Amino acid sequence: MRIANEILMFFRSQKKLSNEVSINETIDIDRDGNPLTYIDIISSEDTIAYDLDIKVHVEKAYELINNILDDRERKIIIMRYGLSSVPALTQREVAKALGISRSYVSRIEKKALEKLKENFGEASLSFDEK
């Protein structure tokens, strides 16, 4: 009698699990004969955290550019790196547009980038690690 109860309990437990599906279960075969599983269909690259991190860093960078840099530094950074819908230019092109030497553009750019890096604080450390 005990064995019969065990068998009935086994069938009841299997009935409860009958609606469960494994994500690794084969649901089809592709053209090359490889199994296609649920995980193949539903898997996607989850970049939400990374995308959010980038967005926060970009917003902070724009805030610093607008609040920390003087007008000339801001203009050179915007022109050099193609920010605010401005195409990126070489130092030589920036120098020509502003009527100053390329070496002066280089010095201003270097100084502006150092200011930004100093003020970026901890956020720049986590950004550089990616």
Image (tube, rainbow, N blue to C red):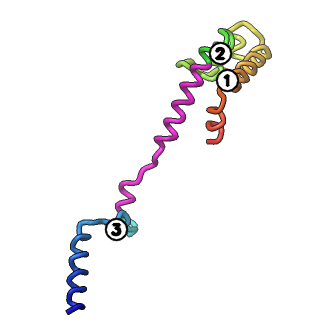
Q: Which of 122 and 99 is in front in this view?
A: 122
The residue sitting at 66% across, 36% down in the picture is 125
Residue 35 drawn at (x, y percent): 38, 68
CB of mark 1 within 8 Å of CB of mark 2? yes
Query: Residue at label 3?
Result: 26
Over which residues does the magenta segment extend?
37-64
Q: How far apart are marks 1 and 2 (CA)?
A: 8 Å
**In terms of secondary structure, what is the magenta stretch mainly?**
helix
The residue sitting at 49% across, 41% down in the picture is 49
Vertical relation: 7 (above or below) 74: below
Secondary structure at badge 2 equals: helix
Quadrant of the image occupied by residue 66: top right
Q: Disc 2 marks which amino acid? A: Ile
Residue 122 drawn at (x, y percent): 65, 33
Residue 53 drawn at (x, y percent): 53, 36
Q: Nearer the viewer, mark 3 or mark 1?
A: 1
- Pointer 3 or 1: first along the chain: 3
The residue sitting at 34% across, 68% down in the picture is 26
CB of mark 3 within 8 Å of CB of mark 2? no
The residue sitting at 72% across, 13% down in the picture is 95
**Left or right of 107 in this view: 77:** left
Residue 39 magenta: yes
Q: Disc 1 marks which amino acid? A: Asn
Quadrant of the image occupied by residue 33: bottom left
Query: Residue at label 1?
Result: 119
Q: Nearer the viewer, mark 3 or mark 2?
A: 2
Query: Residue at label 2?
Result: 68
Q: Which of 114 and 98 is in front in this view?
A: 114
**Left or right of 128 in this view: 62:** left
